[in-house]
Amino acid sequence: MTSGGGKEPQRSPSGPRSNAQCERRWQWSASASASKDCSGRFVALGHNWIAIISLGLLAVSDASMARSGWRPSERKYPYQGIDISHHQGHIAWAKLPRQGVDFAYIKATEGSDHVDRRFSRNWHAAHRAGIHRGAYHFFRLCGSGRAQAANFVRTVPFDAAALPPAIDLEFPGNCSRRPSRAKVHKELGDFLRIVEGRYGKRAVLYLTRRFDKRYRISRTFDRPLWLRSIRSEPSFGARSWSIWQASYTRRLRGVRGHVDWNVAARWPAAS
């Protein structure tokens, strides 16, 4: 659920340099013993710099561990939870309520024919653990909205107490083709009519800033918003968020690897 980008770093032009230029370029400190050539490449690093780099790596590791335990204030946001899929493998659901997991969105389907292989087990296990559960669908831009809705309805049992169905709308992992805005609105509209008719609740729309900017989903569809904004409250969307994805690096006992962490503006069942 992340994407990256950026410019290629500027490279220094190749070509011969004088000894004086070489010395100026690589004279890091009087105590560092680094040998080099005039193409600007290190041949070896001195012991002092190895120590400094090692300390830097340890600092980065410590910061990552701190971020893994971070979550928004429970006093300010009393309703907090996770979203998961088969990527987390086996989950010890009974261990999660004691770690502040109030609700869980569980991946059910993707596109018109894919069903998450752990959905049924996660769906029933979350219920047994007393965690409020909801199902989500990863919406494929290159697929029919009707066919995708049929896949979701076939897979997710009706439960009046469940959270509203959620639709994951983002570019990473999606089709490389980018349909027109009108096409996406039409297919998403078809999906919503079928799914909302089946479960009797307005669906929640999960959005990234890039996706919403490209397709103007939050302006076009008046539905509760689930917005991704890591470590700071979302500042996009046509209205206030109902759910905020605040982290994707939370670690919990009973869950393998990192897990997405979310907070709700109010108890999600009210959406």
Image (cartoon, rainbow, N blue to C red):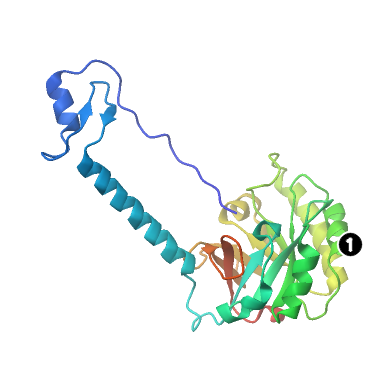
Residue 145 in the image: above or below residue 165:
above
Q: Is residue 65 left or right of residue 248?
A: left
Q: Quadrant of residue 23?
A: top left
| Residue 165 visible (yes or no) | no
For disc 1, the marked residue is: 154
Q: How many marks on residues? A: 1
Q: Quadrant of the N terminus?
A: bottom right
In percent of width and height, residue 189 lies at 79, 58
**Residue sitting at x 72%, y 74%:** 126
**Residue sitting at x 50%, y 62%:** 230
Residue most extreme to the top: 16
| Residue 177 visible (yes or no) | yes
**Residue sitting at x 71%, y 43%:** 175
In percent of width and height, residue 33 lies at 17, 35
Pick the front one: 119 or 152: 119
Question: Crowdedness of circle 1 by 10 Å Cα count: few (<14), some, many (20+)?
Answer: few
Q: Quadrant of the C terminus?
A: bottom right
In percent of width and height, residue 66 lies at 42, 66
In percent of width and height, residue 90 lies at 69, 64
Pick the front one: 143 or 64: 64
- Which amino acid type corresponds to the residue marked 1 in the rendered image? Arg
Secondary structure beneath dot 1 equals helix
Residue 63 in the image: above or below residue 28:
below
Q: Is residue 244 left or right of residue 56?
A: right
Residue most extreme to the front: 47
Residue 107 in the image: above or below residue 3:
below
